[in-house]
Image (cartoon, rainbow, N blue to C red):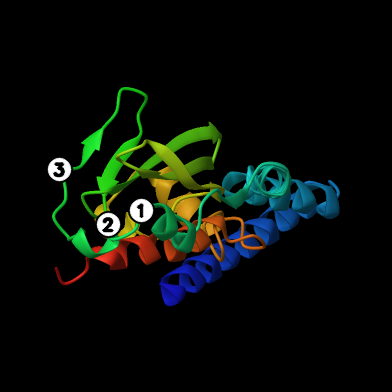
Amino acid sequence: MGIVIFGAMALYLVVSIAVVAFAARAAKKKGRSPWRWGGAAALAMYLLVFWDLIPTVVAHQYYCGKEAGFWVYKTLDQWKAENAGVAETLSEKRKPQTTGKDGHFRYWTTQRFYTDRKQTRFMHAVLREEERLFDANTDQLLAQSIDFLRGQSGNVFAMGGSLDDYRQALILGWGNRGCGATQPTERMRVFRYEFQKLGEGK
């Protein structure tokens, strides 16, 4: 993936330099300012691909700092204390995955716990991802995470997508797409797995 990204960026840089040089030469022949024509060409080549880079990065960082996070409402030890002997009865038998009317995707880790995950297009090139872990018997919320993802993931190169999807994966999705400082999605995954392990191998 890194080779593809750097290769594409290097190619675009070479093409951009050639366009700027051509514009500067053309301006000089016509008695115009090479700096102005070259600068205009450079700006056009930048905006052609990077037009949404700065506003997307700024908005992503803002909402990561304002809304993103990971919250625990009940730990595994607390749940075990309130449900003595239940952990030993859990297994990997799960209900079918479903999609709710509000667009959330529900999947089960054991017959007792399920996770609702929902992704919404928060703004151009920024996705809001929310995950909530529930105790199915009581519908009690055990933990919640909110993350914001910028651009598209590298999966578009394997699964396909539009030309803009490829551009977003190369330009906006490079590096840490989520709120790296707080790592809400990763912390939720680790927390959820502690509950999932209760049924593993059973």
Residue at far front of view: 84
Drawn side of residue 103 relative to residue 15, left or right: left
Drawn side of residue 197 relative to residue 28, left or right: left
Residue at far bottom of view: 3
Drawn side of residue 174 relative to residue 111, left or right: right
- Residue 19 tag number: none
Please state the horizontal and vertical placement of residue 164, each as a whole percent of the image: 44, 44
Read off the residue under disc 2: 86
Say which of 109 and 105 sits in front. 109
Read off the residue under disc 3: 96
Disc 2 residue type (three-letter): Val
Residue at far top of view: 101
Mark 2 vs 3, N-terminal side: 2
The residue at the point 64 percent across, 43 percent down is 51
Q: Which dot, 2 or 3, sits closer to the camera?
A: 2
Whole-angstrom CA distance, mark 1 to mark 2, is: 6 Å
Label 1 residue SS: loop
Q: Which dot, 1 or 3, sits closer to the camera?
A: 1
Do the residues under discs 1 and 2 have CB atoms within 8 angstroms? yes
The residue at the point 55 percent across, 33 percent down is 122
